[in-house]
Amino acid sequence: MITIETIKRELENIRYYYARRDMFDKAFDSVGKNAILQTVARYNEVICSAPPKIYEMYVSLYIECCTYESAAEVLGYSVNYVYKTNKKIVDFFFNAMNKEAA
């Protein structure tokens, strides 16, 4: 069973990876692939079954590394809506990943 805290920590790592993707890609050739790629693949697989608004917000916040404010501006939502949808992202992963584990 995966916890909410683990999901939040892994989402932070996913965001970090995408923010520094070029560095990771360059290092793969000389050092090897980092374990974050397994986490990224797992989360990307799960998010594909999410409702469109959750999927959209995941891409904006974690793949494109937008802040709540910049995501709200780009997507045309309020900052509060982005905040609430991010909570739904975490809940979505919690439910989906724990359902798979059962």
Image: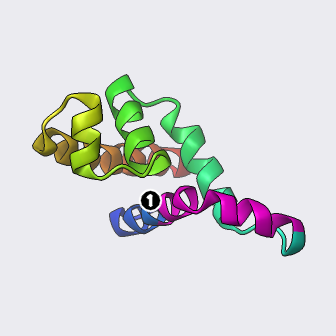
Would residue 6 be counted in the magenta stretch?
no
Image point (45%, 62%), residue name: 2
Vertical comparison of 53 with 31: above or below: above
Q: Nearer the viewer, residue 32 or 74?
A: 74
Would residue 16 be counted in the magenta stretch?
yes
Q: How many marks?
A: 1
Q: Magenta span: helix, strand or loop, mainly?
A: helix
Q: Is residue 3 left or right of residue 17?
A: left
Q: Nearer the viewer, residue 18 or 73?
A: 73
Magenta-colored span: 13-29
Image point (32%, 28%), residue name: 53
Q: Secondary structure at mark 1?
A: helix
The residue where tag 1 is placed is 11
Q: Quadrant of residue 20?
A: bottom right
Q: Is residue 69 left or right of residue 1?
A: left
Looking at the image, which residue sits at the far right? 30
Vertical comparison of 40 with 73: above or below: below
Q: x%, y% of residue 85?
A: 24, 41
Q: Nearer the viewer, residue 74 or 33?
A: 74
Mark 1 burial class by Cα count in 10 Å: few <14, some 14-19, many 20+? many
Looking at the image, which residue sits at the far top? 52
Q: Is residue 1 visible?
A: no
Vertical comparison of 20 with 86: above or below: below
Q: Nearer the viewer, residue 2 or 13?
A: 13
**What's the residue type where badge 1 is placed?**
Leu
Q: x%, y% of residue 3?
A: 39, 65
Q: x%, y% of residue 7?
A: 42, 61
Looking at the image, which residue sits at the far bottom? 31
Q: x%, y% of residue 35?
A: 70, 68
Q: Quadrant of residue 60?
A: top left
Image point (75%, 59%), residue name: 25
